[in-house]
Amino acid sequence: DAKTTQPNSMESNEEEPVHLPCNHSTISGTDYIHWYRQLPSQGPEYVIHGLTSNVNNRMASLAIAEDRKSSTLILHRATLRDAAVYYCILANSGGSNYKLTFGKGTLLTVNP
Amino acid sequence: DTGVSQNPRHKITKRGQNVTFRCDPISEHNRLYWYRQTLGQGPEFLTYFQNEAQLEKSRLLSDRFSAERPKGSFSTLEIQRTEQGDSAMYLCASSRSGGEAETQYFGPGTRLLVL
C-alpha cells in the first residue's frame, strides 16, 4: 500500500486558515488522494479527495502538487469544531477492494 | 438519519466470552467494511463485503473472528473467546461501488473492553 507522511500534530487559532501537509512520494498514477478526519469519540468522516487538480468543497480545499508527490488540505477558517485527527490516504480502484490504509494522521488543535 | 449505525456502542466483557457487533449500512450501499482502531492509532482494515460476499480478510482477522452479511444488508462481526488484546474500537463503513474514487461513510463504532 502506498504510504503517506504527515506531521503528528499542528496547532491553529480559531478563524485562521490551516494548511495540513501530506507527503506521498511513492504515489502511483491511479491513486486518489483522500482526506478523512476523526473527531473525538466518533468514526472517521470524509473531507475531500482529488486526483490531479485542486479541489474545493464546502468543508475544505485540496491543493495537489504538480508532481503529485505532496498535497495540502486547507481549512479556510478553522473553528473549534475542526479540532480532530486528519488522515491523508491514498487509494485506488484497481481491484474491487477500496480499503483505506490509515496512518496516525495529524492531530489538529484549534485555540479559541 | 440514514447514516451508518452500529450496535452496541459500548461493550464490556470478560476474557473468554463471545461478543457480536452489528452494523447497519446506508441502505443503497453495496460495499461494507470493518476496521479496528486501537488507542493512538488510525483504523486498520479487517474485512470487506460486496453485497453478501466476503471478498477479502486481513491477516489481522484471526480464526476467532467471523463476519457475515446475510442478504447483503446488515453485517455482524463476532469475536469468539475474547482476549484482552481484542480491546479496541470496531468501526464499520459502507460505500457504493461504481465510481473511480470511492467515499466511505463510517459509523460511530463499537468500543470493546475485554477485562
Image (cartoon, rainbow, N blue to C red):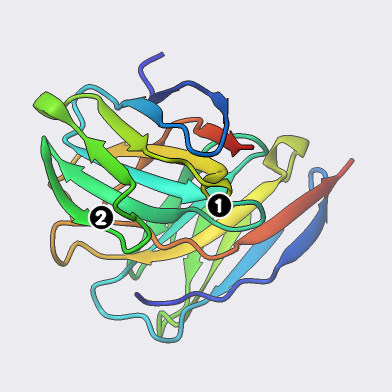
**Chain letter behind tag 1:** B
Q: Quadrant of the N terminus of chain B?
A: top left
* Cα distance between the residues tagged 2 and 1: 34 Å
Dividing the picture into quadrants, the one containing residue B58 is bottom left
Residue A82 seen by the camera: yes
Q: Amino acid at mark 1?
A: Gly
- Sequence order check: which comes first, mark 2 or mark 1? 1
Q: Nearer the viewer, residue A95 or A81?
A: A95
User: Which residue position holds label 2?
Assistant: B101
Residue at the top extreme? B1
x, y percent for residue B70: 13, 27
- Residue B85 has which mark? 1
x, y percent for residue A16: 79, 50
Q: Which residue is located at x 35 percent, y 25 percent?
A: B22
SS class, disc 1: helix
x, y percent for residue B25: 29, 27
Q: Nearer the viewer, residue B96 or B65?
A: B65
